Image (spheres, rainbow, N blue to C red):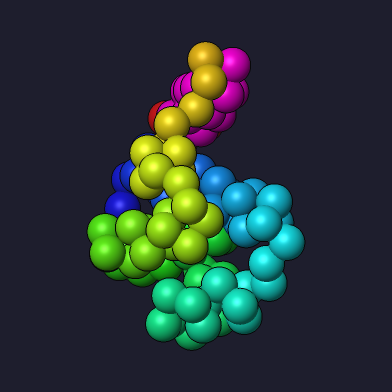
Amino acid sequence: MDFKRKLVYKHIGARIAYFRALNDMSQDELAHRIHISRGTLSKIERGSYDSSVSLDTLLDIADVFGMEFSMFISSDPEERQYWEKILKNRIKSES
Protein backbone atom coordinates (compact mmCIF):
# COMPACT_ATOMS: atom_id res chain seq x y z
CA MET A 1 0.00 0.00 0.00
CA ASP A 2 1.42 3.36 -0.94
CA PHE A 3 2.10 6.09 1.59
CA LYS A 4 -0.62 8.42 0.34
CA ARG A 5 -3.27 5.75 0.87
CA LYS A 6 -1.93 5.00 4.36
CA LEU A 7 -2.11 8.70 5.14
CA VAL A 8 -5.76 8.84 4.06
CA TYR A 9 -6.60 5.83 6.24
CA LYS A 10 -4.89 7.46 9.22
CA HIS A 11 -6.74 10.72 8.56
CA ILE A 12 -10.13 9.00 8.44
CA GLY A 13 -9.33 6.98 11.55
CA ALA A 14 -8.23 10.06 13.46
CA ARG A 15 -11.43 11.86 12.48
CA ILE A 16 -13.53 8.92 13.68
CA ALA A 17 -11.68 8.87 17.02
CA TYR A 18 -12.13 12.64 17.31
CA PHE A 19 -15.88 12.53 16.70
CA ARG A 20 -16.23 9.55 19.02
CA ALA A 21 -14.51 11.52 21.79
CA LEU A 22 -16.69 14.57 21.09
CA ASN A 23 -19.72 12.33 21.56
CA ASP A 24 -18.27 11.01 24.85
CA MET A 25 -18.46 7.47 23.54
CA SER A 26 -16.12 4.58 24.30
CA GLN A 27 -14.71 2.32 21.60
CA ASP A 28 -16.72 -0.53 23.11
CA GLU A 29 -19.96 1.43 22.84
CA LEU A 30 -19.41 2.55 19.25
CA ALA A 31 -18.25 -0.91 18.16
CA HIS A 32 -21.35 -2.47 19.73
CA ARG A 33 -23.65 0.02 18.02
CA ILE A 34 -22.21 -0.68 14.55
CA HIS A 35 -21.79 -4.44 15.11
CA ILE A 36 -18.00 -4.77 14.85
CA SER A 37 -15.42 -5.76 17.44
CA ARG A 38 -13.65 -3.17 19.55
CA GLY A 39 -10.37 -4.43 18.09
CA THR A 40 -11.57 -3.72 14.57
CA LEU A 41 -12.67 -0.22 15.56
CA SER A 42 -9.31 0.36 17.22
CA LYS A 43 -7.55 -0.61 13.98
CA ILE A 44 -9.82 1.72 11.99
CA GLU A 45 -9.08 4.61 14.35
CA ARG A 46 -5.32 3.97 14.13
CA GLY A 47 -5.49 3.62 10.34
CA SER A 48 -3.72 0.28 10.66
CA TYR A 49 -6.14 -2.12 9.03
CA ASP A 50 -4.84 -4.40 6.28
CA SER A 51 -7.76 -4.08 3.91
CA SER A 52 -10.11 -1.24 3.21
CA VAL A 53 -13.02 -0.67 5.57
CA SER A 54 -16.40 -1.11 3.95
CA LEU A 55 -18.35 1.95 3.02
CA ASP A 56 -21.26 0.47 4.98
CA THR A 57 -19.16 0.53 8.16
CA LEU A 58 -18.20 4.16 7.63
CA LEU A 59 -21.83 5.08 6.89
CA ASP A 60 -22.93 3.25 10.05
CA ILE A 61 -20.41 5.22 12.11
CA ALA A 62 -21.59 8.50 10.59
CA ASP A 63 -25.21 7.54 11.35
CA VAL A 64 -24.38 6.90 15.02
CA PHE A 65 -22.88 10.39 15.24
CA GLY A 66 -25.76 11.94 13.28
CA MET A 67 -23.40 13.43 10.73
CA GLU A 68 -22.59 13.24 7.04
CA PHE A 69 -20.02 10.68 5.90
CA SER A 70 -18.10 13.45 4.14
CA MET A 71 -17.03 14.81 7.55
CA PHE A 72 -14.56 11.90 7.80
CA ILE A 73 -12.73 12.88 4.65
CA SER A 74 -13.10 16.64 4.52
CA SER A 75 -10.70 19.07 6.07
CA ASP A 76 -10.13 22.77 6.15
CA PRO A 77 -7.34 24.36 4.06
CA GLU A 78 -4.93 24.52 7.00
CA GLU A 79 -5.41 20.83 7.76
CA ARG A 80 -4.94 19.94 4.09
CA GLN A 81 -1.65 21.89 4.04
CA TYR A 82 -0.50 19.99 7.11
CA TRP A 83 -1.24 16.59 5.53
CA GLU A 84 0.36 17.63 2.22
CA LYS A 85 3.50 18.74 4.06
CA ILE A 86 3.71 15.37 5.80
CA LEU A 87 3.24 13.58 2.48
CA LYS A 88 5.92 15.65 0.71
CA ASN A 89 8.41 15.15 3.54
CA ARG A 90 7.76 11.42 3.58
CA ILE A 91 8.19 11.12 -0.18
CA LYS A 92 11.50 13.03 0.05
CA SER A 93 12.76 10.76 2.83
CA GLU A 94 11.84 7.63 0.86
CA SER A 95 13.69 8.83 -2.27
Q: Residue 32: horizontal and vertical position, in percent? A: 51, 82
Q: Which of the 4 image quadrants contains residue 94? A: top left
Q: Is residue 57 magenta?
A: no
Give above or below for 14 relative to 75. Answer: below
Q: Position of residue 40 (x, y in %)?
A: 47, 77
Q: Nearer the viewer, residue 23 or 75?
A: 23
Which of the two residues, 55 or 39, is positioned nearer the viewer here?
A: 55
Task: Say left or right for 79 vs 69.
Answer: right
Does 89 appear in magenta? yes
Residue occupying image coordinates x 50% and y 43%: 11
Residue ID at (37%, 39%): 70
- In this view, the residue in front, 81 or 2, is 81
| Residue interval drawn in magenta | 78-92
Majority secondary structure of magenta residues: helix
Image x and y of residue 24, in percent = 73, 61
Q: Position of residue 85 (x, y in %)?
A: 54, 21
**Quarter of the view holding residue 73:** top left
Q: Is residue 29 left or right of residue 62?
A: right
